[in-house]
């Protein structure tokens, strides 16, 4: 029986930081670009996001658009209330597709 290589192993969800405000946007962009470059299905975990602003939501929206264009599915394993509210207030549902049952915290 062949051993599974690390590349065959499922990718762990990318856990978003608790503070997703403008100061964190460049690092968030870099992390998300790295995930896109891997060319594999993507799972994000936003369960611990406590603070989020327009800059970080713009990064997430652009990432979601680029993932969709690349044919890469984006799944969510957790979504905090602040993250969900931010997406709702800015009307970004069509770009940042948060599922209703994504483990709201």
Image (cartoon, grey):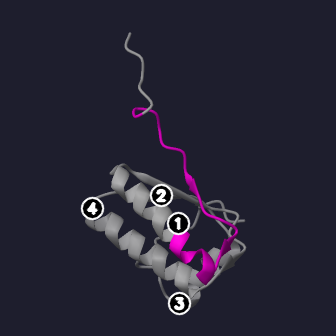
Q: Nearer the viewer, residue 59 or 69?
A: 59
Q: Which residue is mark 4?
A: 70
Give the CA distance from mark 1 to mark 4.
Answer: 20 Å
Q: Residues within 10 Å of mark 4 (few under 14, many from 20)?
A: few
Checking the image for residue 75, the label placed there is 2
Which is closer to the viewer, label 2 or label 1?
2
Give the CA distance from mark 3 to mark 2.
Answer: 20 Å
For the C terminus, the image quarter is bottom right
- Is residue 16 covered in magenta? yes
Which is closer to the viewer, label 3 or label 4?
4
Give the CA distance from mark 3 to mark 4.
Answer: 24 Å
- Is residue 101 covered in magenta? no
Looking at marks 2 and 1 on the same chain, the residue that comes earlier in the sequence is marked by 2
Checking the image for residue 90, the label placed there is 3
Residue 68 horizontal/vertical position (percent): 32, 66
Q: Which residues are magenta?
A: 7-27
Relative to 77, is 92 on the left or the right?
Answer: left
Q: Which residue is mark 1?
A: 99
Q: Nearer the viewer, residue 84 or 100?
A: 84
CB within 8 Å, label 1 to label 3? no
Vertically, is 69 above or below 44? below
Residue depicted at 47% across the width and 83% down the height: 92
CB within 8 Å, label 3 to label 4? no
CB within 8 Å, label 2 to label 1? yes
Residue 98 seen = no
């Amino acid at each position: 029986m062949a051993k599974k290589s690390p590349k065959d192993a499922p990718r762990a969800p990318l856990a978003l930081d608790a503070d997703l405000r403008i100061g964190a946007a460049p690092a968030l962009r870099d992390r998300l670009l790295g995930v896109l470059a891997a060319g594999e299905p993507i799972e994000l975990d936003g369960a611990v996001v406590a603070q989020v602003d327009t800059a970080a939501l713009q990064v997430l929206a652009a990432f979601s658009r680029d993932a969709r264009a690349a044919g890469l599915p984006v799944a969510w394993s957790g979504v905090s209330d602040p993250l969900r509210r931010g997406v709702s207030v800015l009307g970004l549902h069509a770009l940042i597709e948060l599922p209703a049952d994504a483990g709201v915290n």
